[in-house]
Amino acid sequence: MYFWIIKVLTTAVGESTSDYLVHRFDPVTAVAFGALGLVIALTIQFSVRRYVPWVYWFAVAMVAVFGTMAADVLHIKFGVSYAESTIFFAIVLAIVFVSWSQTEKTLSIHSITTPRRETFYWLTVVATFALGTAAGDMTATTMHLGYLVSGLMFAALIAVPALAYRLFGLNEIFAFWFAYIVTRPLGASFADWTGKPHHVGGLGIGDGLVSLVLGILIVGFVGYLTIVDRRSRA
């Protein structure tokens, strides 16, 4: 449960932080700094030999920021529609999944015990964030559903794999990745709803303040998991 809570929070903070930076600085420069942060986070992640809560979630948070920026810059800087970017990132994700499956013969996160498998994992994570960002923006703006309705729709959608797994025996690996992908537009939609101005359907709290609050929540949850992890290894 803590995994999914923090995952949704990181998707939300990635959306709000990216929007805050991209709209206040040159988008290309913001993406460059986002990429640098991602490289630093993944370098630390690949240097450890076991799961370390703050290291792992720092990497996920940086993926959230960079993945959001990648999708947003395609739209803002290069004029690519959200529908086109959604299709593009869906194809990218499919290619990563197929390559991972054919190479390692499994997509289970429990089998990630080698650097190559971890590389496939993080490529998948980046692709899911970019896809989820584009899909969330597409439903909210292109399809004119609005941020709140989009968030509620994805909240209902994320329950599908959980119910299908429990009631109909849906493959657990498929169920996991289905839910993982949906967490991105779910968190992003609610982040946009709270942060965006009233005239575009938001509450007008501001992306900066939303990012700050979400960041504090993430630090609190990850801090708790760090304490639990240390106690379990004592």
Image (spheres, grey):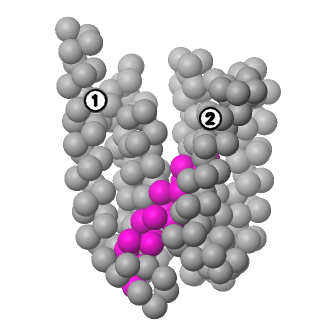
Residue 71: assigned label: none
- Quadrant occupied by the N terminus: top left
Question: In this picture, is 124 found above or below 171?
Answer: below
Query: Residue visible at 53% across and 57% down?
Result: 186
Query: Residue visible at 38% across and 28% down?
Result: 47
Question: In this picture, is 71 found above or below 50?
Answer: below
In this picture, which residue range is highlighted in magenta? Answer: 181-197
Query: Residue visible at 32% across and 31% down?
Result: 53
Identify the residue position indicated by label 1 in the image: 225
Picture coordinates of residue 115, whole percent (x, y): 54, 25
User: Element type at marker 1?
Assistant: helix
Report the magenta stretch's main SS: helix
Of badges 1 and 2, the one in the foreground is 2
- Label 2 is placed on what type of residue? Ala
Question: In this picture, is 108 found above or below 120?
Answer: above
Looking at marks 1 and 2 on the same chain, the residue that comes earlier in the sequence is marked by 2
Question: In this picture, is 12 found above or below 104?
Answer: below
User: Element type at marker 2?
Assistant: helix
Q: Is residue 219 left or right of residue 201?
A: left
Picture coordinates of residue 13, whole percent (x, y): 38, 59
Other-residue count near label 2 (Cα within 10 Å), few / some / many at <14 / 14–19 / ≥20: some
Q: Nearer the viewer, residue 43 or 56?
A: 56
Q: Nearer the viewer, residue 206 or 233?
A: 206
Residue 162: assigned label: 2
Q: Is residue 166 visible?
A: yes
Kindly give the residue lying farthest to the top in the view shown: 234
Q: Is residue 27 left or right of residue 119?
A: left
**CA separation, marks 1 and 2?**
23 Å
186 within the magenta span: yes
- Label 1 is placed on what type of residue? Leu
- Quadrant occupied by the C terminus: top left
Picture quadrant of residue 168 = top right
